[in-house]
């Protein structure tokens, strides 16, 4: 049972958490929340609750428990077009909208999109064209509106199968950027004619957030003793169509899925489908590996990231009712740019970019973290006592991007071998942070922060220490969520 609903009126007033001095930039959806709360009160608060003193979190608690259960189990418990059900839509607006917007902000900024989007708007001499697909309440559009500066004009096309949720999205965009144009498109992304005829071309940003996992069954599944069965990846087919027909040159596609194995594997499938295309660059999460180390269906590992955020009071209150504490966003991501790869300039000392893909593992006297670099998966390893407690190996968050010097060397591990990069005492000192998003060729880490994650079990990968916990974020820790065919 993931959700513990509390009786209305019993919970203490929620307080949003203050930002810790250890953390750097955090997505802040505070500017959006008054409009979300007003919308919920005006359009969704059932009449009987209006004068009962029940809080918004109380009113949505039961529907939220239903959504949370459905988002974290293998069962197809939600009807198609579930956001057309008013109680479920209200719960989505109260909780998943804020987490989704914050996640999209973290992904876009972390992939270095801010300078790219600014440049695209200048080159266009007009509004930046943003297409948010399977948008729900315009989650991706709202993230873009919060992230880009007010001087950048914006034009949104927002698509979903459910017209009511799109209208909510348009209203919310208007409260943040009343100067932007918003076009709604109701239709099914499975319908090739709709995609071809109704969705605009020459888009600068195309967002598809938390939708591929509802799209279809996973493209690969294990058969018998670990064999793979290939299937058509309809998600990858759609994205190919979007890139080829709807994206402007230099434009970006932002894909976000839950931090589950199945969410990550969907994006890895898409990544593998496009890795060979010379007209595309992968901006995140990959750092140059030709093949994803987790691409094989037999692997028990997956790639996801975490990010601290400013949790709004309404989310804190909903978390209490769900028995969650979603103080960190968790997600799988893939950001592609329609532009050939520009080789990174060599950084001082020959440092290479690495993505942190695992939590700290303490093995005998060592501390180890899995990284993904140009050579694939690498173990970053050092003497636990010798490395200072402020060294990033101890606390940098999963998903952070680092520049590290030194050569990874092959070393024996269990029955096979692995690439090992020795942690240097000064690993934390190189200029690796750029709060504005990283410039080309200069990978950036999110600011180091205390990791409260438990250790991973060596040799098993990111999730090994967290067996089938329930959804603590839209980055679900729980069991894989099955796609719901529509
Ligand atoms: C989990 S919600 C995600 C909404 C939003 N992107 C977000 O991240 O908050 C999935 C959305 O996908 C939409 N959706 C599912 N299948 C679709 C399809 N075939 N065509 C268009 N939208 C679809 C649903 O209506 C729903 O709004």
Image (cartoon, helix red, strand yellow):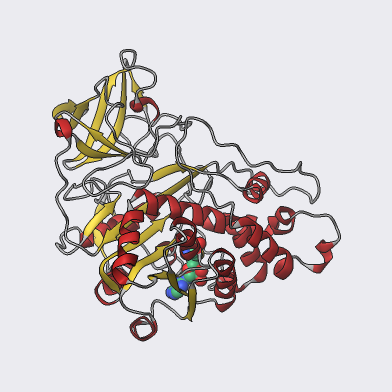
> Left or right: where does residue 143 sit relative to residue 428?
right
Residue 100: where, in percent of width, then height?
A: 50, 56
> Is residue 121 among the parts visible in the rendering?
yes
**Which image quadrant for residue 236?**
bottom left
Residue 317: where, in percent of width, then height?
A: 68, 47
> Is residue 259 among the parts visible in the rendering?
no
Above/below status of 394 relative to 334: above
Closer-to-camera residue (306/418): 306
**Which image quadrant for residue 388?**
top left
Q: Residue at x 69, y 58 (%)?
A: 60
Above/below status of 210 relative to 351: below
Above/below status of 171 relative to 23: below
Above/below status of 274 relative to 314: below
Closer-to-camera residue (154/474): 154
Q: Residue at x 38, y 80 (%)?
A: 199
Q: Which residue is the extreme one toward the right?
A: 51
**Which image quadrant for residue 472?**
top right
Residue 359: where, in percent of width, then height?
A: 38, 33
> Left or right: where does residue 10 sit relative to residue 200?
right
> Left or right: where does residue 46 sit relative to residue 88?
right
Residue 182: where, in percent of width, then height?
A: 49, 75
Q: Residue at x 17, y 43 (%)?
A: 374
């Amino acid at each position: 049972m993931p959700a513990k609903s509390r009786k209305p009126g019993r919970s203490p007033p929620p307080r949003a958490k203050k930002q810790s001095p250890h953390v750097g930039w955090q997505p802040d959806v505070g500017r959006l929340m008054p409009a979300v709360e007003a919308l919920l009160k005006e359009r969704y608060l059932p009449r009987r609750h209006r004068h009962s003193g029940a809080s918004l979190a109380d009113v949505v608690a039961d529907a939220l428990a239903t959504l949370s259960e459905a988002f974290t189990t293998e069962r197809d418990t939600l009807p198609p077009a579930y956001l057309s059900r008013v109680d479920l839509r209200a719960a989505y607006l109260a909780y998943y909208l804020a987490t989704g917007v914050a996640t999209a902000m973290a992904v876009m900024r972390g992939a270095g999109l801010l300078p790219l989007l600014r440049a695209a708007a200048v080159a266009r001499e007009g509004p930046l064209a943003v297409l948010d697909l399977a948008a729900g309440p315009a989650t991706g559009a709202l993230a873009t509106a919060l992230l880009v500066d007010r001087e950048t004009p914006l034009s949104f096309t927002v698509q979903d199968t459910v017209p009511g949720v799109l209208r909510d999205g348009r209203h919310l965009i208007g409260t943040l950027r009343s100067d932007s144009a918003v076009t709604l498109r109701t239709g099914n992304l499975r319908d090739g004619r709709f995609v071809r005829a109704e969705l605009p071309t020459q888009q600068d940003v195309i967002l598809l957030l938390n939708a591929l996992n509802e799209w279809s069954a996973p493209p690969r599944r294990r058969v018998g003793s670990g064999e793979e069965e290939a299937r058509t990846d309809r998600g990858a087919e759609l994205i190919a169509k979007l890139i080829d027909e709807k994206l402007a040159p230099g434009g970006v596609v932002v894909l976000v899925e839950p931090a589950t194995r199945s969410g990550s594997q969907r994006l890895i499938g898409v990544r593998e489908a496009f890795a060979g295309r010379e007209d595309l660059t992968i901006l995140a999460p990959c750092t140059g590996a030709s093949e994803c180390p987790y691409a094989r269906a037999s692997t028990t590992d997956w790639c996801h990231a975490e990010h601290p955020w400013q949790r709004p009071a309404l989310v804190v209150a909903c978390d209490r009712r769900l028995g969650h504490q979603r103080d960190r966003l968790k997600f799988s991501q893939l950001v592609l740019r329609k532009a050939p790869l520009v080789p990174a300039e060599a950084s001082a000392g020959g440092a290479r970019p690495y993505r942190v893909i695992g939590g700290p593992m303490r093995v005998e006297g060592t501390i180890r973290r899995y990284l993904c670099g140009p050579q694939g998966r690498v173990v970053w390893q050092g003497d636990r006592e010798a490395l200072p407690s402020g060294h990033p190996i101890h606390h940098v968050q999963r998903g952070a991007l680092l520049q590290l010097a030194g050569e990874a060397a092959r070393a024996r591990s269990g029955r096979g071998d692995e690439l090992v990069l020795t942690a240097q005492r000064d690993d934390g000192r190189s200029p690796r942070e750029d709060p504005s998003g990283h410039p080309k060729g200069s990978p950036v880490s999110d600011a180091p922060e205390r990791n409260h994650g438990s250790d991973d079990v060596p040799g098993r990968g990111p999730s090994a220490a967290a067996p089938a916990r329930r959804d603590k974020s839209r980055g679900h820790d729980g069991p894989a969520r099955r796609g719901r065919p529509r």
